[in-house]
């Protein structure tokens, strides 16, 4: 079965520092990968997605992610973190090629120090 | 503005009670989904519906029921058979193949 892992449960960075959140997916013929952000008590907001083509994907709020098939990874990056980026981040993979149903990672909680 | 509305935002349930969580969308999306979120476990799929009057079980459907009588509405009932219902519940809908929209969630607590 497909699965998504996020090795870091909680990460703390200082404001202005760079950020990388890790995501690994299990083998799939054609991964469709997403990053979502969730503020406390809120729904999920899409940051970016990868279907095919350029392996470096740009998203909203200054985030980007790089798809590396050889490492089965889709890590999220931001060059300079803002205090408002503190939230929970979820990596997700679509379960099948018909666009049905996500498999979500367990999430990484990001704290930002002033 | 189009979107998904979940209500109530907070819900308290007594032991043995059934409760229903509301999910309404005005995006004209065909597919709708219910997810359960627990700390450290990400989101898990409860039920989904691709068209009106049809729905499918997800990974953790036991103790839950749904209906899809209208395109706009996909209510979730948490029955007394659900032994550990305290969680955050998220509803989502899908328009294009990859275009999901999430609601803002309902936090259910058993008292």
Image (spheres, coloured by chain):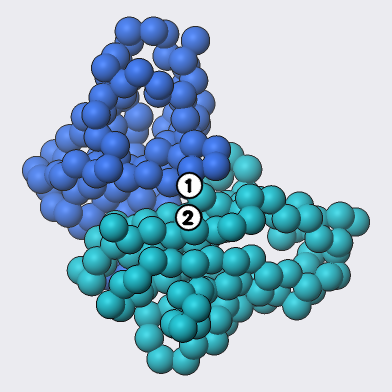
In this image, A63 relative to B84: left or right?
right
Quadrant in the picture for the C terminus of chain A:
bottom right
Give how far across and how far down residue B80 sits, in percent. Answer: 29, 14
Figure quadrant of the N terminus of chain A: bottom left
Q: Position of residue A23 (x, y in %)?
A: 53, 66
Q: Residue at x 32, y 45 (%)?
A: B45
Which label is found at residue A49? none
Which residue matches tag 2?
Answer: A105
Q: Residue furthest bottom?
A: A54
Residue highlighted by disc 1: B42
Q: Residue at x 32, y 54 (%)?
A: B93
| Local secondary structure at mark 2 | loop
Q: Is residue A90 left or right of residue A27?
A: right
Q: Colour of chain B?
A: blue
- Residue B65's place in the image compared with A8, above or below, is above
Q: Is residue A45 shown to the viewer in this render?
A: no
- Seen in the picture, residue B37 relative to A33 is either above or below; the reply is above
Label 2 crowding class (10 Å Cα cut-off): few <14, some 14-19, many 20+?
Answer: many
Q: Horizontal placement of A28 versus A10: left or right?
A: left
Q: Residues within 10 Å of mark 1 (few under 14, many from 20)?
A: many
Pointer 2 chain: A
Task: Report the front residue among A10 and A78.
Answer: A10
Q: Position of residue A66 (x, y in %)?
A: 55, 81
Chain (cyan): A
Residue lying at 38% horizontally and 86% vertically, measured from the top left: A52
Front-most of B40 and B78?
A: B40
x and y percent of residue A51 in the render?
A: 37, 80
Say if residue B77 shows up in the picture.
yes
Mark 1 in CB contact with mark 2 (< 8 angstroms): yes
Q: Secondary structure at mark 1?
A: loop
């Amino acid at each position: 079965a497909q699965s998504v892992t996020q090795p870091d449960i909680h990460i703390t960075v200082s404001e202005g520092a760079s950020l990388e959140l890790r995501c690994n997916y299990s083998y799939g013929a054609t991964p469709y990968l997403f990053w979502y952000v969730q503020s406390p008590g809120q729904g999920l907001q899409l940051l970016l997605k990868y279907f095919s083509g350029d392996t470096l994907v740009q998203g909203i709020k200054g985030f980007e992610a790089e798809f590396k098939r050889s490492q089965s990874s889709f890590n999220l990056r931001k060059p300079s973190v803002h205090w408002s980026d503190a939230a929970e981040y979820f990596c997700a993979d679509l379960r099948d090629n018909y666009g049905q149903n996500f498999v979500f990672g367990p999430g990484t909680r990001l704290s930002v120090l002033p | 503005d189009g979107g998904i509305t979940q209500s109530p935002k907070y819900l308290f349930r007594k032991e043995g009670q059934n409760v229903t969580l509301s999910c309404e969308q005005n995006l004209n999306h065909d597919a709708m989904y219910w997810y359960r979120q627990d700390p450290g476990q990400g989101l898990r799929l409860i039920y989904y519906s691709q068209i009106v009057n049809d729905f499918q079980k997800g990974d953790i459907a036991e103790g839950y029921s749904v209906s899809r009588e209208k395109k706009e509405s996909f209510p979730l009932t948490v029955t007394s058979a659900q032994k550990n219902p305290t969680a955050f519940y998220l509803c989502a809908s899908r328009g294009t193949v990859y275009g999901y929209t999430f609601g803002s969630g309902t936090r259910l607590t058993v008292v």
